[in-house]
Amino acid sequence: MKISQVNLYQLAMPLVTPFVTSYGVMKEKPFYLVEVVEENGQKGYGELEAFAVPDYTEETSETAYLILKHHLLPLLKGEDIQHPREIKERFSSIRGNEMAKAAIESAIWDLYGKCKHRSLASLLGGSRQLIDVGVSIGIQENTETLLELVSKYVDAGYTRVKLKIKPGFDKEPIQAIRERYPNLTLMADANSAYTRSDIKLIKELDRYQLAMIEQPFGVRDFLDHAWLQNQVQTRICLDENIRSLSDVQLAVALGSCKAVNLKFSRVGGLTEALEIISYCDQEDLLVWCGGMLEAGVGRAHNLALASRSEFRFPGDISQTSRYFESDIVTSDFSFKEGKMSVPNGFGIGVAIDFKQVDKFLIQKETLFLSDK
């Protein structure tokens, strides 16, 4: 495959309700829809998931766009790509900028699937048609509102709930949920809101039978997480500080966690994600599929990846309607009794709804990579 041009659609999709974490409040999802076009006209799609401000990782939608345009895409000019796995090596001279890399690489995986008349799930080694999924709930104003939300999602069929927590909103809401739903698979996501000084509180959370506590400490820390995991029974899960396979290997060597939230956009693409999955399976480390408030294209990529048998814990891949009133793909993803179906068409298996793209469009840019 030779990429002749790339179209970048800058979009902003309003969220149904603001999503509150310890980082702050998100009212809309800014992202780029990446369209790669090969010389015969076939197209593949990916999403650039970096947020507007550098609070989750160092990347932002603006900086990732600049890296993608000026440093990554020139590396593909005139190149004949035999397989998407090659992209990781072609981009290796550019340090970091994982989300920028993943946006292009995932679009090329979609393009490759369409050219080969295969689904992305099958290309990635996925075998399941239905996968268990969970829901992530942001920080709420009060416990009553929180319990109403949890009830709504439990009634809808979700069997796993992740609650965002921060100092002042942690033990009480967790206790309230556990008292009402003693058998619900419940986990907490701290988004690095705690330090060693909070050890007494974190130890108290052991009593609530949480599936895990996600990223309690700093986004580049492994030592303090190892210290914590040695003192609590609950699994510690790492998220923000896992950017590569080598990060997972470091976490295993130090004993920093017992679970990994894997987001392929945060580790540079699907190729790196596959290597991480294999390593986690080898080390008996729980790995599950996280989410970045993706629109339909990113959600389809996540479903394809999560169809692999190693994912035995429900991921953050809930329905589009959970976040957005309308999506940029022509069909919604089937959800029933806590499970979502994996698209089985060629590539990501969903088509782009360009009327919706136009609705959320800020600007479009076309970059030509052909030597002609």
Image: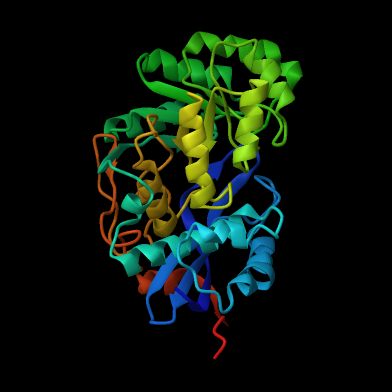
Quadrant of the rendering where the C terminus is positioned: bottom right
Residue 26 in percent (x, y) is at 57, 49
- Quadrant for residue 295, please give it: bottom left
Residue 359 in percent (x, y) is at 43, 71
Left or right of 39, for residue 269:
right
Q: How many marks?
A: 0
* Residue that appears at 30% across and 38% down: 131
Q: Is residue 206 visible?
A: yes
* Residue that appears at 27% across and 41% down: 128
* Residue that appears at 39% across and 22% down: 185
Residue 112 in percent (x, y) is at 39, 65
Residue 119 in percent (x, y) is at 30, 57
Front-most of 181 and 51? 51
Residue farthest to the right, as pictured: 197
Q: Is residue 30 visible?
A: no
Front-most of 296 and 247? 247
The answer to whether residue 203 is above or below residue 19 is: above
The answer to whether residue 307 is above or below residue 167 is: below
Quadrant of the rendering where the N terminus is positioned: bottom left
Q: How is the image coloured?
A: rainbow
Left or right of 70, for residue 155:
left
* Residue that appears at 34% across and 61% down: 347
